[in-house]
Image (cartoon, helix red, strand yellow):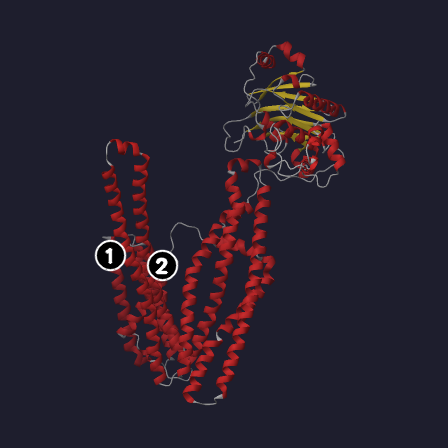
Amino acid sequence: MKLAMAWLSLPLAVLLDFLTLRLALRLCPLLQPWDPLALAWGVALARGALLSLSAQAARGRGQGLPGELREALLPLAALLSLLLPGYVTLQALAQPRAPPSELLHGWGRGDVFGLTYGAAGLAAALWHQLFPAGRGEPGPSASLGRLLACVRPDLLRLVAIAGFLVLSSLGEMAIPYYTGRMTDWIVSEDDPSAFGRAIWAMSLITVGSAVTEFVSDCLYNGTMNRIHMRIQSRVFSSVLRQEIGFFHTNRTGDVTSRVTADTDAMSEALSEKLNLLMWYGMRGVFLFGLMLQVSLRLALLTAVGLPLVLLVPKLSGKFHQSLAQRVQESLAKANEVAVETFQAMATVRSFANEEGAARRYGQRLQETYRLNQQEAAAYAASMWTNSLSGLALKVGILYYGGRLVTAGAVSTGDLVTFVLYEMQFTTAVEVLLSVYPSVQKAVGSSEKIFEYMERTPRISPPGTLAPPSLRGHLQVQDVWFSYPGRDDTPVLKGVSLELRPGEVTALVGPSGAGKTALVALLERFYEPQRGRLLLDGRDLREYEHHYLHSKVALVSQKPVLFARSLHENIAYGLGGRSRQEVTGAAQRANAHGFIAQLSHGYDTDVGEMGGQISGGQRQGVAIARALLRDPRVLILDDATSALDTKSQLQVEKEIYEGARAGRSVLLIAHRLSTVERADRILVLEDGEIREQGTHRELLARRGSYWRLAQKQLNGDQGGGSEDGLGAGGP
């Protein structure tokens, strides 16, 4: 019932509007003393109020009406009210001495009433088709604002581009203008020399327009390349600042795609489409302004007829697109039959059903052929309606323009100029409507890019503490930790330990005990949910980022090297270091021997991820990279597991000698023979410190450490250590 009342209220509102206008027409003789424009706007305001109330009533009862129609009722009411007074106001401004238009007293005429409703309906339909609302997609306004913020450093360049666009657009207007003037001169045969001057003027202006367009394009492309480089650099820098958990929860391919492919696609779309949008937008503004100057009536006729010209191809094109999609779906079904048949060819052959399979495939192709014929007809109809609607507008302009020429309102040359302007204006509008969705899509697709750029790392920002000297006394106090997204599964449960300068502290335990999680906390890859980590009595969060990681060095079981020389890998992150310093660090890590035997020595490229050298050699290079920093805290996460016996002994010597020199060392190892000499051994099981003491003390207790030793003694290695920092991660 409510739906029926809602649909009934719409024609009743139209009828009430018509009766109101008829009443205004009857009252016109009584209101003769009034100014005609004031009378027009007074009636418009009263009409607007009546239509708005009717629209609100229909919206209140119209829960069953289409959402787009409900949303369009109020804008339609405003458009219907303002259309006629707006027209007569423009006419009065353009021809101030002309008598009042008949339209001022023609409110209730059927033709005027139908014209206003037709124009408003066409405008609403066109708006809905071009800018549909309520599709569940967020608007790109936020991303557009971010893009504008990114282009702020190039604001002067963009102003210069706009200036060149204005000059070029004005130059484009010269040919239609002078063509019209020459038409008048030919018809009137006045001043034959003016024809030659017009040709020269057209030529010079056209050349100037081409030059300014060339300069504008060069400047625009250079500016867009600068903006692209700036955005891509900012995205990459922002990603580098994120916490390690970000890279565990986001796939490397997705992150790389955002940094490279997405920014490239966005920049290419903006570089190409935004240029067209700016260029044709500027031309459209100037063209319509000149059309208004040549003939206000013809310009308004164009403005009224253009929505119809653009809407008809849009509607017919949608039908063609739907048929094209059905063709693709039908072809996909035919391909499915072929693939299914080829994959089961043995079964088809064994049942002698080759003809049946061919018949089934042919039926699918017949369906595709039928849809292809419909698509071809729809495409032809779409092209026909496109040409016909454009032709109808041109014929209407020529017909109405011819009447204006006959009446002496415009000259023949003005009509020629206007027609040329209209053709260019229609082309500009069509290009704008086709390009704008692409720009909108490019801006919308930048949403994820800006999410990365503006993402705040989920870890406390580093402090500024960088004392000139550091002892390296590291304390872990009652630390509880769970990986992001696994708050109900703590990896560390109240862990407390201490790394003292001059001592080697060993950490052992089965895989999954939490050793790697503890290392990640010491390196500030994560932060604990509870507890504190102190370095020389100050929280780790207080230290400056570069300072902290120059004093706390980590070597993991599977270190990562970069596709560059061995010298650059050892000096990674330290800037320029001399060959002598790098060689000294390599000798202390027992890596100098194999490096010296390489054909290019320290200049040898190790390949991607260090794939050109062995695992043991990678560990040696990684240890040299850590020792070159001369850290006060050295963390070795099973970093000697791939070394040969000689290299391991050399590294162990460096470890213990460095500790005696005042360095704090945390040695995580799976082979217990590596930790026997440690000053203190901690046994970590299920996220808790179960035992601690020296090698002899722990064996004597016959507890967890003793059981680990028995497993190794019996040849059961228990699975291997955690693979560097990635293991145990989310």
Residues at circles 1 and 2 in contact by the CB criterion of under 8 Å = no
Could you tell me which residue is drawn at 37 percent across and 65 percent down?
A: 78
Q: What element carries label 2?
A: helix
**In the image, residue 688 lies at what x, y percent?**
58, 21
The residue lying toward the viewer, choosing from 512 and 96, is 512
Left or right, 727 with reference to 305 = right
Q: Nearer the viewer, residue 626 or 377?
A: 377
Q: Which residue is denoted by mark 1 in the rendering?
A: 5
Q: Nearer the viewer, mark 1 or mark 2?
A: 2
Residue type of the residue flagged with mark 1: Met
Q: Which amino acid does label 2 sit on?
A: Gln
Toward the bottom, the furthest residue is 190
Which residue is pictured at 36% across the width and 64% down the height?
310
Report if residue 46 is visible in the image. no
Residue 301, position in %: x, y?
36, 73
Q: Residue at x 37, y 62 (%)?
A: 75
Question: Label 1: few (<14), some or many (≥20) within 10 Å?
Answer: few
Estimate the x, y position of residue 257 in percent, counting from the top left.
Answer: 51, 44
The residue beneath circle 2 is: 129
On screen, 343 above or below 293?
A: above
Above or below for 686 versus 373: above
Q: Quick one: label 2, few (<14), some, or many (20+) residues within 10 Å?
A: some
Measure how far apart labels 1 and 2 are at the Cα level.
Answer: 27 Å
Compared to residue 145, the image places residue 511 above or below, namely: above
* Labels 1 and 2: the sequence-earlier one: 1
Q: Residue 330 carries which label?
A: none
**185 or 637, which lies in front?**
185
For residue 589, which quarter of the picture? top right
Residue 174 can be seen, yes or no: yes
User: SS for tag 1?
Assistant: helix
Q: Position of residue 487 (x, y in %)?
A: 51, 30
In-image side of 95 versus 232 (left or right): left
